[in-house]
Structure formats: C-alpha cells, structure tokens
C-alpha cells in the first residue's frame, strides 16, 4: 500500500503542478481572448481532439488488452509511436477535409486556417497517448509525470509571454497548443521509455483490429463529453461555448485525483489474474470515490470566488454550470477502475454498450434542454449522462465478477487507511510503520 501511495503521490505532485500551470494558462487565454475568442479557440481545439479520439482507433485499449501476453510486450512498445503517427496523420487530414466540406462557419469558426493549424496536433496527440500507455503498463510512472509537466510548462511559459506582450491571438494560442503537444513525445523518445527493440507489422495490424473492436465504446465516451460543445455552438454561438468550455475545464479538475490512482494501478490491473485484478479494482475504487468527492466539494464551494477572481467577471455565468457538471464528472472519475477491469476481459460489448447508451441519452437530453435553458441545459444533460455511464459500468462490473456494487463504496476504515498511507509518504515519517488494522 505504501509503495502504491508513493507512486500516487508522485503522480499527484506532477498533476498538481500541471493543474496550477493549466489554471494560469487558461486564465491568460480567457482574459486575452474574452468569451467569444475563447469560444473560437476552444472550438478549433475540439475539432482537433475529436479527430484525435476518433482516429486513434482505441490503440491504448488494444495495447492494454494485448499486454497480458508477455511475449508481445516488446513489439507493442516498438510499434506504438510509428503506428500512432500513421493513424494520426490520416485522421488529421480527414478532420480538416470534413470541416472544409461542411464549412467552418457552421462551427462558428472564422476560417479553415484555424482547423489546419489545430489538426497538426492530431498525430502528435495520438503518438503521445500510445507512448504514455506503454510507459504506464511498464510501471514507469515517473517518466509519465515528467512528460506531462514538461508539456504544461512549455504551454504556460509561451502563453504568458504572448499575453504579457499583448500578442496572444486565437492563432497564436493554437500554435502554442500544438507545440506543447509535441513535448511529451519528445520526452518519451529522448529517454526511450515508449520504445521497444523491434517492430512487428503483423502485431500492428492485430493492434488496429483489436482496438477497432473496442473503439465504438471509447469513441462514444469521447463524444459523450464533447458532442455538447458542437450542439451548444449550433444553438447558442461562440460566446456561450467560451463560457461553457471554461466550466467543463474546471469540472475536469475533479477527476484528477481519481485518474491518478487509476493510472498508477493500470499495471496491477493488467499484470495479474482476473480474480486478483477484481480484488484490486474493488479496493482501489473505494479510495477513488473518496478522491473524487473531495475535490468536487472544494470546487463547488470555491467556484463563486474562483471564477471571477481568476478568469474575470465576463465568465461569472460559468459558476452554475460548474455546479451542474460536478456530480457527473465525479461519478466518471470514481468509475474509471471498474471500466478498466471490463477492458481486460476482451469482451467488446462490455465497453461499447454502456457508452453508446449514455451518448444517445446525452444527445437526446441536449437537444431537449439547450433550446430551453442554453448552457445550463447542456451542463445538466451532460452530467446526467455521465452518471448513467458510471452506473452502467459499475453494474456490469458487479455482474461479471459476482461482487456487489455496494462493495465499491468507501467506509470509514478506507478513509483512515488512505490518510495513514498518505502520512507515511511525508518526508520524515517512519517508512517501516505498519498499516492500521482494517
């Protein structure tokens, strides 16, 4: 438990630093571009991230599923970056072409050039995702930490310099975002963390085929969390997107602690038997619930002051949106470990069906609520869909393992154990101390 806690706290430290840098970067962009300009910037970024998520063909899920075969691990690592760059280039070109066909004005974008710039990040993003997944499967958490921190620091410094010189435009912000997106990949290549000694074309094809079987699930999850942006843009325009996207970004911080735990535990979930993995999933999910609840409460209490103080009075309308999004985002963070367990079973429908159902509900609710309540309706619809997805994944985990869903909920002893483990990792504490009973 102590070793795991140290890994969690190490990654948490880097995530905390990234969070601080992210808040500063986001505030500089928000204040320099104002809501409408931020909406245009975020729309271009959303197009690129959509191309990234739809074009990666769930390679990370395929890597994780195939990682259980030890003989394939070296080739999976060797294939990761080249395969990702090929898929990313094709996906980026497809995304750019699609926007050109439908017209950038339909997305409230002033021109095609913004899409071209943003989509340069697509191959870089997919390659970084593939590489970091290999790094985490190998248990090299520290390398993943430094790569994230280096990317966030690069973006923050560049944005701050441009903002200080009053030269931070939408195009400049996009160029910085693309450049910062290349930094994690450079780190992985420099240290050789995501590389393998050889490549295997047949395994690359197997990876694509395996990932494609799961892809409807992760693609649906991504669309679940981003389709609302497209619908809000169509119904309400760039200014509303700028305010709503800020609320989405703030609510996303709720998942940081739970995501850190799930990433650190990835190796244990996929390098053990089904029974051992299920036991680990139950134990750590109880901690993840606590680690999602705490930041949710902090954010909901601080948002009324935080938003205006950091981002400016023009974004005050984001506060109620944060409140509406918080429960759903918290549920997603808490359910990530059960979702990962379902992936290791290599039964695609366990991943696909819950995601497609939640996406369909999200789209239907957004179409009903956005015309009536605008961004608030969008936030409510999305939060309800997130809770639905978490509930479906938890129910499936309980069904396939025979473990009661209520066993995933924390008890008082879990809070004591979590706090004790964290205290042991504080410098000066006795590392040889044993855990308390229970």
Image (tube, helix red, strand yellow):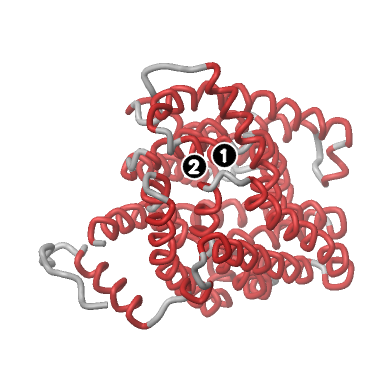
Residue 117, x across and y down, in percent = 67, 31
How crowded is the residue under tag 2: few (<14 C-alpha within 10 Å), some, or many (20+)? many
Judging by the rendered image, the residue that carries numbered circle 2 is 155
The answer to whether 431 is drawn above or below residue 112 in the figure is: below
User: For the N terminus, which image quadrant?
Assistant: bottom left
Residue lying at 44% horizontally and 38% vertically, measured from the top left: 132
The answer to whether 340 is drawn above or below residue 401 in the figure is: above
Q: Is residue 241 left or right of residue 26?
A: right
**Residue 285 sits in quarter:** bottom left
Q: Is residue 295 left or right of residue 321?
A: left
Q: Is residue 10 left or right of residue 82?
A: left
**Secondary structure of residue under mark 1:** helix
Q: Is residue 93 left or right of residue 404?
A: right
In the image shown, does 231 or 362 lie closer to the viewer?
362
Q: Dots 1 and 2: beta carbons under 8 Å?
A: yes
User: For the C terminus, which image quadrant?
Assistant: bottom left
Residue lying at 67% horizontally and 75% vertically, measured from the top left: 320
Judging by the rendered image, the residue that carries numbered circle 1 is 177
**Residue 385 sits in quarter:** bottom right
């Amino acid at each position: 438990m102590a070793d795991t806690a140290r890994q969690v706290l190490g990654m948490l430290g880097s995530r905390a630093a990234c969070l601080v840098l992210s808040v500063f970067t986001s505030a500089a962009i928000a204040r320099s571009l104002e809501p409408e300009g931020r909406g245009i910037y975020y729309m271009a970024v959303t197009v690129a991230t959509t191309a990234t998520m739809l074009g990666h063909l769930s390679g990370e899920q395929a890597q994780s599923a195939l990682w259980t075969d030890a003989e394939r691990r070296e080739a999976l690592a060797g294939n990761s970056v080249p395969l990702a760059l090929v898929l990313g280039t094709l996906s980026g070109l497809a995304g750019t072409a699609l926007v050109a066909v439908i017209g950038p004005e339909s997305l409230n974008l002033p021109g095609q050039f913004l899409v071209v710039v943003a989509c340069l990040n697509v191959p870089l993003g997919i390659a970084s995702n593939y590489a970091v997944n290999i790094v985490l499967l190998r248990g090299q958490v520290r390398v993943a930490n430094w790569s994230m921190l280096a990317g966030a620091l690069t973006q923050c410094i560049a944005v701050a310099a441009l903002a200080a010189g009053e030269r931070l435009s939408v195009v400049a912000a996009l160029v910085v975002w693309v450049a910062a997106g290349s930094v994690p990949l450079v780190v992985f290549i420099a240290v050789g963390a995501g590389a393998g000694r050889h490549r295997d074309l047949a395994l690359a094809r197997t990876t694509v085929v395996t990932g494609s079987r799961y892809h409807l699930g992760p693609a649906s999850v991504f669309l679940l969390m981003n389709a609302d942006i497209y619908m809000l843009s169509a119904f309400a325009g760039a200014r509303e997107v700028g305010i709503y996207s800020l609320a989405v970004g703030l609510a996303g911080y709720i998942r940081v602690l739970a995501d850190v735990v799930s990433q650190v535990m990835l190796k244990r979930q996929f390098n053990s038997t089904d029974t051992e993995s299920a036991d680990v999933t139950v134990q750590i999910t109880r901690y993840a619930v606590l680690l999602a609840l705490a930041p949710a409460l902090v954010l909901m209490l601080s948002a009324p002051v935080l938003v205006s103080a950091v981002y400016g009075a023009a974004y005050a309308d984001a506060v109620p949106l944060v409140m509406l999004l918080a429960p759903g985002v918290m549920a997603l963070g808490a359910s990530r470990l059960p979702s990962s367990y379902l992936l290791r079973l290599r039964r695609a429908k366990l991943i696909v069906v819950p995601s497609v159902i939640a996406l369909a509900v999200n789209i239907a609710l957004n179409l009903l609520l956005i015309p009536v309540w605008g961004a608030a309706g969008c936030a409510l619809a999305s939060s309800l869909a997130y809770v639905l997805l978490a509930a479906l994944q938890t129910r499936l985990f309980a069904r396939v393992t025979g473990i009661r869903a209520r066993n995933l909920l924390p008890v008082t002893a879990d809070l004591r154990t979590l706090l004790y483990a964290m205290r042991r990792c504080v410098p000066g504490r006795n590392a040889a101390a044993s855990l308390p009973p229970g």
